[in-house]
Amino acid sequence: MKAIKITKENSSKIESAIEAVQSRAKIRTISVESIFKRIEYIENYLEHLLYKKDWNDLVFSVDENSQSFPSSYNGAPASTQYKVKRKATGWFLEAVERTYCREKRIKTDLTEKSQEMAQFVSRFYF
């Protein structure tokens, strides 16, 4: 998937990327609005931790429907998850996939350039 800049103008492109992944799914799905809300949440959180210039190349994996399941639960339920990356011009949707639910809603992916910053940020639970 080619990275899509997360803006209101690109809502239709983002929607088509989401629909391609969750076309048959009925539960644990996401929407364009949920991506916008989560980006706003991440930005509000990062404002208190880092200078804006240090946000470049931070990557977050998001599972809007994260939850833990008891061991007696048969199978592993899937949810739609996405990966966003901060670049100099804004946030970009890097990937959308349907995979097993995680326990953590937002996970920081460590990259080479942002290793120091991400190490500090990854200590916090979103």
Image (cartoon, rainbow, N blue to C red):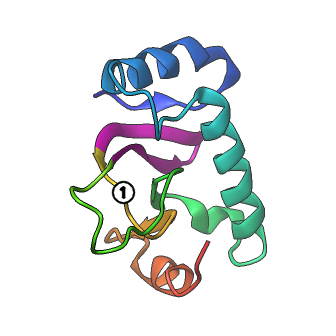
Q: Amino acid at mark 1?
A: Cys
Quarter-of-image position of residue 113 = bottom left
Q: Is residue 98 above or below residue 23?
A: below
What residue sits 50% from the left and 22% below the top?
Answer: 14
What residue sits 52% from the left and 48% below the top?
Answer: 87
Q: Main secondary structure of the magenta part?
A: strand
Q: Is residue 103 above or below residue 27?
A: below
Q: Nearer the viewer, residue 63 or 109?
A: 63
Q: Is residue 123 magenta?
A: no
Quarter-of-image position of residue 44 = bottom right
Instruction: Please tell me whether mark 1 sits on a helix, a strand or a loop.
Output: loop
- Across and down, in percent, residue 103 comes to 43, 69
**Residue carrying label 1:** 101
Q: Nearer the viewer, residue 60 or 34?
A: 34
Q: Nearer the viewer, residue 113 or 103?
A: 103
Q: Is residue 97 magenta?
A: yes
- Quadrant location of the N terminus? top left
Tell me which segment is drawn in magenta: 78-98
- Residue at the limit of the structure toward the left, as seen here: 75
